[in-house]
Each structure stands twice: as C-alpha cells, then as structure tokens.
Amino acid sequence: MNFAVKVYPRTIWGERYHGNFDQLTDEIAAAGIQNLIVPAFQGARIFFAQQFDPEPNPWSLLPLRELCAQKQLGFAVEFPIFNDRDTFDRIPAFRPQSPDGQTYPPDFWYRPICPSHLDFNQHRLHLIEGATANLKPALALINFLWCPFLPRPAFDTAETRSGTETWEEMGSRVPMFCVCPACRQNFTEVTGLANPLQDIEAWFAFRSEQIINVLADIEEVSQQSPAAPSLLLELPPIATPHFAERLRRLTGIHLEAIRRLSSALSPQLFYNEHGQSPAWPLAVLDELAAYDFSLFPQLDFPELTAFSEDNLHEFVFLLQSLETRKIGALSLFHWENIVPLPQVLNIVEQFSYAVS
Ligand SMILES: [Zn+2]
C-alpha cells in the first residue's frame, strides 16, 4: 500500500515540531508513509514565496519540499478552493445563503465561500499559479471545489430510514446553499429563469457548470506551469446509496462531466467524524468503481481520547478491503491525529512494506 498523510501548518509550525522539518519528515518516513500532502495556502496565510514579497516569507514550504526530495518522500500540495476562513469573516457578501436568506452557520473550521464571485475565483487561480511555480509539486489536490452544503443532513438517519421517498424528494428541492443574490443573478443570466424552482434540473446543471468552469481554469493554469502537476479532485463526505447523484445535487460535482478534466478522485471517507460504520466508506468506493477514475481515498481517525481497540480492527479491515478492491493508495487524515497512536503507525508500516 502506498500511503500519504495530510500535514497541516498547525502541525508543522505548532508545539510538536516548531518548524523542524527534519524531525517531521524523519517521523513520517519511519512510519512507512511515502508521501506528504500540505496546503499551499489557508485563509489569508500563504505558504510559498511570492514574486513581490517585501521580505522572505517565514511560512514557506519550499525547504520542506527540498527535504522531502532528499529523503525520497513524495511532496503534494493541497489547494483549498471554496473554504477560506478569513474571507468568510471579512466579506459578508461572499458567505453562502439559503433560500430563506440565512447565512451559512460558521463552523469550527469550515468557512465556505459562494462560488459565484469571479474576483474570489480569480484570486484563487492566482494563488494556484504562484504555488505551482514556486513549489513545483508533482501532484496537486483540489479540495473544497464544491457548492457549500451541510454534511450532516447527508447522514441524517431519518433520511436513511425513509429510503427512496426522501431520496426522490431531494430531486425536487433546492439545496440549502448557495442561493444568494449573486448566484440567482448568474442563474438568470445563463438560463433566463428568475427562480431556481421554475426548473430544478436547470438549477442543478447551472451549479455543475460553475464547478466545472473553475476546475477547467485550474487545469489550464497548472498545465501551463513547468511542474504541470497531476490533479486529484477531493470529494466531500456524502451518503450512499446513489452517492454520485446526491453529490451532483448537493454539491454540483458531476462525475461524468469532470472526467475529461480529472482522472483521479480522492473521496473523503471520514466515517469517524460522521459517526458511520466502516461499511459506508466501502459503499462509496463500490459506487465509484462504476466510473473510470483512479481512486486515492482518505480515511480519518477518531480523537485520541475516543480511540479504542475497535478502531484498530476497523483500520486493518479497511486496509484489507482496499487491497481486495485493488486500491493501492490511501491518504491518512491527518498526521497530528495519528502521530500519538503507535498502534496505528505499526499497522501502516506493516501494510506499507507488505508485498501484495
Ligand atoms: Zn451564492
């Protein structure tokens, strides 16, 4: 199994490592993990040198990238698109709105941005261009490239119980986010319709167009750079069955349409965070197998205080299940959560070196 681990700035420059890249990469390599994935920017913070920086950026990932190359660790970057805490806090017009005019409730960490603002999208592309030129990643993960939604209703047990009836209702409801004035205006310009409810399929198609247009721009910008990284599109946690159709309606990600731009997907199978059993990640992968994508799934781990022997059994079960499905790569979410768990690191090491 080929492992990657997500590493966040809070971990890299926080209490455990204090920016000691040598120790960080040694510990990751010792666990048998072959790749690091780090965000190139987060909110207003930028982790690469820009052309007109008045002084050297103290939060540069370039030395980490160079150290990874020396130690033969893969170095991939993550580009978070419609999630930006600082912009959400600073510019109220960019906050997603529901049909009844409610603003998206600020979460602990997820602060989504409405996809209808060209200036925000252009700024994102500019950052991607700069990060790709400076950090020269071979692989770039595109994260949060979706219309904002609240993950929890997707896992509503009432919905699961009521089955197809609720599922069918989903096809006639306007998803809760985003239906702000900018989205409505863009929709009217494209379709001539004043209200999404006049033609709900036109609304779904409009949202999918928004997402694919941004992905096409990202693809163009990254392919123009000498690094020309492969793109890996992250998928948010969505319930099954009918994963792909729920994904399209809730988030605007239309798998058949994005196939021409991206050949690899990284579904976020955070079953611990969403209180699901390991059956859910496998159900997602089985549904995705019907599409022609390379799969690079992500698994999460519970908080240290909630971690039990059962979690270890589940982890081994899931790794074996991935091997059975011929999925040879897995991303672990995230390093700070698993570094205090030597049992997990032992399992990773065993699977990393196992000959399959
Ligand atoms: Zn909007």
Image (spheres, rainbow, N blue to C red):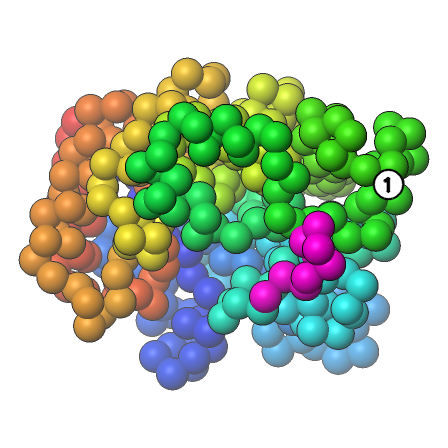
Q: Position of residue 22 (x, y in %)?
A: 38, 69
Please identify the quarter of the rendering in which residue 210 is found: top right
What residue is drawn where x is 91% and y is 29%? 192
Would residue 65 be seen by someone viewing this image from the given angle? no
Q: Decide if residue 321 is on the left or right side of residue 108.
A: left
Would residue 195 be seen by someone viewing this image from the given angle? yes
Q: Position of residue 97 (x, y in %)?
A: 70, 56
What residue is drawn where x is 76% and y is 36%? 196
Q: Position of residue 63 (x, y in %)?
A: 53, 65
Q: Position of residue 123 (x, y in %)?
A: 79, 56
Please identify the quarter of the rendering in which residue 47 is found: bottom right
Considering only vertical position in the picture, is 23 above or below 353? below
Q: Decide if residue 31 is on the left or right side of residue 228.
A: left
250, 290: nearer the viewer: 250
Is the residue marked by circle 1 packed among few (<14), some (14-19), or many (20+) residues within 10 Å?
Answer: some
Q: What secondary structure is marked by label 1?
A: helix
What residue is drawn where x is 77% and y is 68%? 92
49, 86: nearer the viewer: 86
Q: Which residue is mark 1?
A: 186
What residue is drawn where x is 82% and y is 44%? 184
Magenta region: 97-105
127, 148: nearer the viewer: 148
Q: Decide if residue 62 is on the left or right side of residue 209.
A: left
Instruction: Name which residue type carries label 1.
Output: Asn
Q: Main secondary structure of the magenta part?
A: loop
Considering only vertical position in the picture, is 331 above or below 65? above
